[in-house]
Image (cartoon, rainbow, N blue to C red):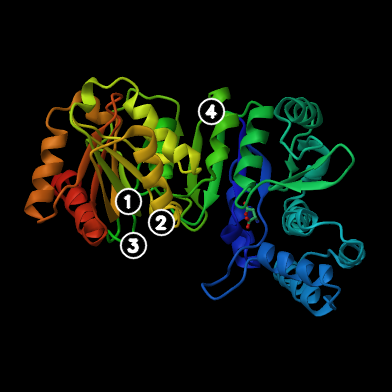
Amino acid sequence: MLKVVKFGGSSLASAGQFSKVGKIVRSDESRRYVVPSAPGKRNSKDTKVTDMLYQCYAMAEAEQNFNAALKKIQERYESIINGLNLTLSLNKEFEVIAENFKKKAGADYAASRGEYLNGIIMANYLGFEFIDAAEVILFNANGEFEAEKTNERLAKRLKGCKNAVIPGFYGAKEDGTVKTFSRGGSDITGSIVAKAVRADIYENWTDVSGFLIADPRIIENPEVIKVITYRELRELSYMGATVLHEDAVFPVRKAGIPINIRNTNAPEDEGTLIVESTCRQPYYTITGIAGKKGFVAVNIDKDMMNSEVGFGRKVLAAFEEHGISFEHLPSGIDTMTVFVHQEEFEGKEQQVLSAIHRLAQPDSIDLEGDIALIAVVGRGMRSTRGTAGRIFSALAHANVNVKMIDQGSSELNIIIGVKNCDFEMAIRAIYDIFVVTQI
Ligand code: ASP
């Protein structure tokens, strides 16, 4: 058994958190490769070290004195080192960082130091080898991640290396320039390492016990999803359920390696297992519910639309002309509705309407804003009759008016449009009917 374990910022925010991580790693010999994030928030008012680094570097770039800001960052690390009773000094490292800030080494370099320094502490604490991600995570000259080359380099470097710490979030171009992934990118590094060593499992340790069936800000203490497929996860993440960086899925998914989301503060919890496919039916018919507010329905009417070849294409061309992507496209015989993001659409609405008139000559167009979309996702829906019926009767009982229904042919999800103000009520009603009443 071989595991790659990634720990998020909140799992490494203080010496206390580090020692929980130490226990987790030492309790299982197969946890051989560790990918740390930078120290995160210790409480809700705290600042992540990554953000402190970005701010400090912005001062350097503006030719301001950044010494005090950098000192504060060093103190964060020193409190971890002292709390763990390590005999490790980062003075030299901070001198180099200050020099490089003065030379304007770049915001990516600055941000990457968060993971780099945490990796040094972690390696020292665990007695593992430290491998600088700049040597093994490779980007091309345009700043695009080089998957193949990285895989080869990492596999070679880790062969024969029993235990190692590889900091998350960054790598380097061939000329040595440090490049980071987008925010939250340590998840991606973990996945890349898991693929390179052909791990049996990629454990992603965070501060929640896995993906929840629904948003805890709407549902009190929602249940944890035990097993979820990559496709279900994608549907839910797209609709706002975020625990894992979206791009973290690709390396391991292709290699058939499951991801296990675990909680550093509750290591006995099994967490959520993310798999390619499973014959295990979910306990409830649905796997999860997620949603977003802030959509506009652009309703387009034209008599005999159904027999007009190319009508849909012309309508969509109007959106394309203005760089607006659409979310959903339910249609009837003489009507077609295009759902778009309100934020993206608002500033251009009149231009888009006139483009639709010019290109498709509809009879009328009607806009309705402040719509929320809710995705009810579950592989279990495929084999269960009446799922849609249950959703709609639950919504009717809750007095929620349904504006739109869209079920993909995969039967993996049902999308429902409601008014923004009904959003929370709708999610509660759906959760109740599928989860609460089934417990
Ligand atoms: N430290 C980086 C961030 O705050 C990357 C990560 O934590 O995954 O975005």
Distance of label 2 from label 4 (alpha carbons):
37 Å
Asked whether mark 2 lies closer than 8 Å to ligand 1, one says no
Going from the N terminus, do you reach mark 1 or mark 2 first? 1
Instruction: Classify the position of ligand 1 by quadrant: top left, top right, bottom left or bottom right.
Output: bottom right
Q: Amino acid at mark 2?
A: Glu
Which residue shows up at 67% across the image and 44% down it?
34
Question: Residue 253's mark?
Answer: 4
Q: Residues within 10 Å of mark 2 (few under 14, many from 20)?
A: few
Q: Point out residue 410 in the picture as x, y percentages from the top left corner.
A: 31, 24
Q: Which residue is mark 1?
A: 296
Label 4 vs label 3: CA separation? 30 Å
Residue depicted at x 27% and y 27% = 411
Sequence-first tag of 2 and 3: 3
User: In this orientation, which residue lies closer to the viewer: 307 or 115?
Assistant: 307
**Figure check: 11 above or below 172:** below
Say whether marks 2 and 4 touch (CB < 8 Å). Answer: no
